[in-house]
Image: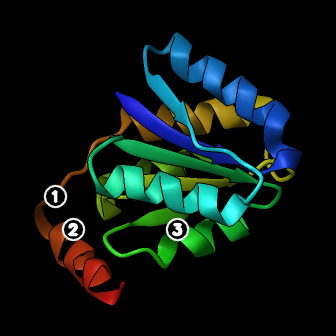
């Protein structure tokens, strides 16, 4: 699967660990990181919304900025996560296509587990679609 990624300057080390992990899992990673972190986040959301990438992962020190920018983009369901269960369930129940993580909040092992859970999960649909439709109408 193709995964779009961005990280702020403070998250470069964790970003490389996550890129290596995704590549070991067989995923293709497109890195949109740059000097302007907000513009990089928007590039990730655009890539996911336009079908250029199936999922997106956003990294910054606390995950908050990435989440706030992505959540304001039309057609995007993003979740800020700091544990693997939330990463799985937000994909399963909310059809989240992007997650935001705080690199000062989680460690290396947990970061890999979150990425694996998110990329390994699928959307269940069914009764959850009502909520997803409501989310999509908000942005």
| Residue nearest the viewer, comparing 98 with 8 | 8
Q: Position of residue 21 (x, y in %)?
A: 61, 20
Q: Position of residue 56 (x, y in %)?
A: 47, 47
User: What residue do we see at 36% from left, 51% from top?
Assistant: 48
Q: Residue most toward the front?
A: 35
**Above or below — where is 31 with respect to 36?**
above
Tag 2's secondary structure? Answer: helix
Count residues near mark 1 (Cα–Cα under 10 Å), then give few for <14, some for 14-19, many for 20+.
Answer: some
Pointer 1 with pointer 2, Cβ within 8 A: yes
Q: Which mark is in front, 3 or 1? A: 3
**Above or below — where is 86 with respect to 110?**
below
Q: Would you name the residue on which mark 1 appears? A: 125
Quadrant of residue 3 within the rendered picture:
top left
Q: Would you name the residue on which mark 2 appears? A: 128
Colour treatment of the image: rainbow
Regarding residue 97, the answer to whether it shows in the image is no
Count residues near mark 3 (Cα–Cα under 10 Å), then give few for <14, some for 14-19, many for 20+.
Answer: many
| Image position of 13 (left or right of 111) | right
Tag 3's secondary structure? Answer: helix
Q: Number of labelled discs?
A: 3
Per the model, the C-alpha gap separating discs 3 and 1 is 22 Å
Per the model, the C-alpha gap separating discs 3 and 2 is 21 Å
| Residue nearest the viewer, comparing 68 with 80 | 68
Chain-order first, disc 3 or disc 2 = 3
User: What residue do we see at 26% from left, 47% from top?
Assistant: 51
Q: Which mark is in front, 3 or 2? A: 3
Q: Would you name the residue on which mark 3 appears? A: 70
Q: Position of residue 10 (x, y in %)?
A: 88, 47
Quadrant (top left, top right, bottom left, bottom right) of the N terminus: top left
**Above or below — where is 129 with respect to 27?**
below
């Amino acid at each position: 699967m193709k995964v779009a990624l961005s990280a702020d300057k403070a998250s470069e080390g964790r970003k490389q660990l996550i890129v290596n992990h995704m590549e070991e899992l067989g995923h293709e990673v497109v890195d949109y990181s740059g000097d302007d972190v907000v513009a990089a986040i928007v590039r990730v959301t655009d890539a996911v919304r336009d079908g250029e990438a199936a999922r997106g992962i956003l990294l910054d020190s606390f995950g908050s900025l990435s989440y706030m920018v992505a959540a304001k983009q039309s057609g995007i369901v993003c979740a800020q996560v700091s544990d693997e269960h939330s990463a799985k369930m937000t994909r399963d129940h909310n059809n989240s296509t992007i997650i935001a993580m705080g690199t000062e909040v989680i460690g290396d092992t947990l970061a890999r587990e979150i990425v694996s859970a998110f990329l390994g999960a699928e959307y269940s649909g069914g009764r959850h679609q009502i909520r997803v439709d409501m989310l999509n109408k908000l942005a």
